[in-house]
Amino acid sequence: MRSVHYAKQREMLKIIGKDISYVVSDEDIRRELGISLFGEKTQEDTELPKIKKACEKCQHPELVYTTRQTRSADEGQTTYYTCPNCGHRFTEG
Ligand SMILES: [Zn+2]
């Protein structure tokens, strides 16, 4: 009886082994995708203008900003700040 039980255990280990190898390969694909997505995001970030200004939420010292002209030229332009660290957005202008 003991040998039968042992054989079952070995069979289970074979199945577990397959599962693990499948999970690892799947994880490798996800990791590769994650790296490529992160690479694109970083490239996008470098194109955005940055300003030395502290985030009012997390105190991150550098913020990404965009400016937009308001309808009336007399009102000047509004500056939109986005924190690359916590994603907090706020305007000034
Ligand atoms: Zn922040």
Image (cartoon, grey):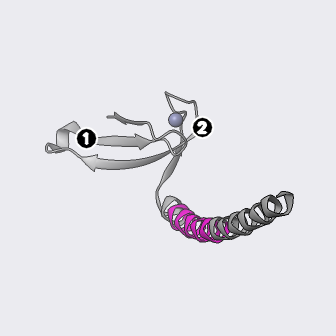
**Is residue 74 inside the magenta stretch?**
no
* Quarter of the N terminus within the rendering: bottom right
Rendered view: 74 above or below 46: above
Q: x and y percent of residue 40 in the render? A: 51, 67
Q: Amino acid at mark 2?
A: Pro
Instruction: State the residue at coordinates (68%, 67%).
Output: 15
Q: Amino acid at mark 1?
A: Gly
Instruction: State the residue at coordinates (57%, 66%).
Output: 30
- The residue closer to the viewer here, 49 or 11, is 11
Q: Helix, strand or loop at disc 1?
A: loop
Of mark 2 and mark 1, the one earlier in the sequence is: 2
Instruction: State the residue at coordinates (59%, 69%).
Output: 26
- Quarter residue 25 falls in: bottom right
Q: CA distance from mark 2 to mark 1?
A: 25 Å
Q: x and y percent of residue 62 in the render? A: 56, 42
Label 1 belongs to which residue?
A: 76
* Quarter of the C terminus within the rendering: top left
Instruction: State the residue at coordinates (68%, 70%).
Output: 18
Whether residue 2 sits left or right of residue 17 in the image: it is: right
Q: Helix, strand or loop at disc 2?
A: loop
- The residue closer to the viewer here, 33 or 23, is 23
Q: Residue furthest left?
A: 71
Q: Which residues are magenta?
A: 24-42
Whether residue 43 sits left or right of residue 73 in the image: it is: right
Label 2 belongs to which residue?
A: 61
